[in-house]
């Protein structure tokens, strides 16, 4: 009799436990449904992100150079050059005054540089070292690479232009303020082609691929993609003695200045105030060209009066 009571008790316990389990499952299902409805109601209350309108660069005059490439007019006036937070050769941060000039809107492409080579019979661009299949970076639509400073200088002269000065390059990239990058102080993502493939490009990108990375004057790729030869010789102490108006670099030097970082540089080294240097004969996969041009007063009108 005692064993029969124990058996009945066990059956009752199992049955009650089963009922409680069913009730628990129903409750958890109900609670999960309530949570889903709550999340759904929250989502419906979230306002869609407002699209940021692209900046209007039409206020800056443009011309077409002798090589058929668009150039943007950089207006006369002062800007802040250098950085007090960068490398020693970027200091002192100071005001520089530049006359009006034009700057290529985009980097010269390999197709455009090849036309120059064919017409002038100059030696072809040459990349001595590349760790991958070189065909990945040798395409007509990609930036021109593999030219020395003399080659870059010759291209710009052939196009009726010249290499920009270091000061002209920096103003075209950062405008009149102290911004670190063409678009602002924070690097973010999707603005420029630098080291890594998070920006969508393992190596080079076609010039003009980053709309959100344009400079205050509308120029593309002033940070990343390829670094660019400029006219100046390099002197690490030049900023300490450079003139206020239209500095053009030291009269001589063993190295030439390169600006703008490249697809191999870190975010820190892609800052607009960062200075690089190289022998005039250096050629590699990270250095390209962007040309400048003086204002033709007969065609473009008189310059604004200086203060």
Image (tube, rainbow, N blue to C red):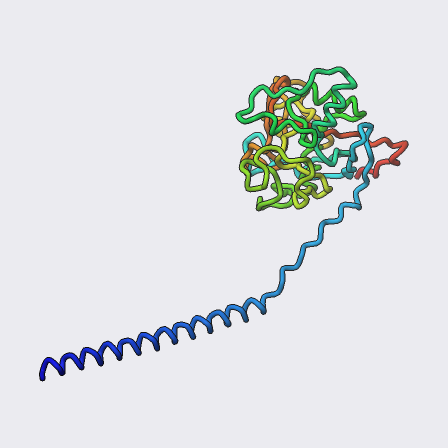
Is residue 237 visible in this depiction of the protein? no
Nearer to us in this view, 303 or 132: 132
Nearer to us in this view, 202 or 175: 202
Q: How many marks?
A: 0
- In-image side of 81 versus 99 (left or right): left
Considering only vertical position in the picture, is 42 above or below 147? below
* Residue at the right extreme, as displayed: 298
* Residue at the left extreme, as displayed: 1
**Residue 94 picture quarter:** top right
- In-image side of 122 versus 138 (left or right): right
- In-image side of 43 versus 55 (left or right): left
Considering only vertical position in the picture, is 110 above or below 59? above
Seen at 61% across and 19% down, the residue is 282
In which quadrant is the C terminus drawn? top right
**Residue 120 picture quarter:** top right
**Residue 222 picture quarter:** top right
Q: Could you say where residue 4 lies in the image, as x and y percent from the top left?
A: 13, 82
Q: Could you say where residue 35 lies in the image, as x and y percent from the top left?
A: 46, 71
Q: Could you say where residue 290 lies in the image, as x and y percent from the top left?
A: 71, 30
Is residue 96 visible in this depiction of the protein? yes
In which quadrant is the N terminus drawn? bottom left
Seen at 63% across and 45% down, the residue is 184
Seen at 71% across and 53% down, the residue is 53
Nearer to us in this view, 245 or 87: 87
């Amino acid at each position: 009799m005692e064993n029969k009571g124990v058996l009945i008790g066990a059956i009752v316990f199992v049955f009650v436990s089963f009922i409680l389990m069913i009730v628990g499952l129903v409750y958890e299902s109900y609670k999960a449904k309530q949570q889903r409805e709550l999340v759904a109601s929250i989502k419906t209350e979230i306002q869609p992100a407002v699209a940021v309108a692209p900046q209007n660069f039409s206020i800056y005059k443009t011309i077409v150079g002798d090589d058929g490439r668009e150039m943007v007019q950089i207006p006369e006036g002062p800007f802040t050059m250098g950085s007090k937070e960068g490398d020693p050769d970027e200091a002192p941060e100071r005001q520089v005054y530049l006359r009006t000039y034009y700057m290529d809107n985009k980097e010269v492409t390999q197709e455009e540089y090849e036309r120059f080579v064919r017409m002038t019979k100059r030696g072809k661009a040459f990349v001595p070292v590349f760790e991958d299949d070189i065909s990945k970076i040798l395409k007509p639509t990609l930036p021109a690479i593999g030219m020395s400073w003399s080659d870059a200088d010759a291209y710009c002269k052939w196009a009726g232009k010249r290499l920009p000065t270091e000061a002209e390059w920096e103003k075209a990239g950062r405008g009149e303020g102290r911004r670190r990058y063409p678009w602002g102080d924070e690097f973010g993502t999707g603005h420029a082609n630098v080291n890594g493939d998070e920006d969508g490009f393992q190596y080079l990108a076609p010039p003009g691929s980053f709309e959100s990375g344009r400079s205050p004057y509308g120029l593309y790729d002033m940070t990343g993609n390829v670094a660019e030869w400029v006219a100046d010789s390099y002197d690490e102490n030049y900023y300490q003695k450079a003139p206020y108006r239209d500095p053009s670099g030291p009269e001589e030097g063993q190295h030439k200045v390169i600006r703008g970082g490249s697809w191999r540089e870190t975010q820190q080294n892609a800052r607009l105030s960062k200075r690089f240097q190289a022998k005039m004969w250096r050629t590699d996969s990270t250095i390209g060209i962007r040309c400048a041009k003086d204002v033709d007063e007969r065609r473009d009108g008189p310059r604004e009066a200086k203060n």
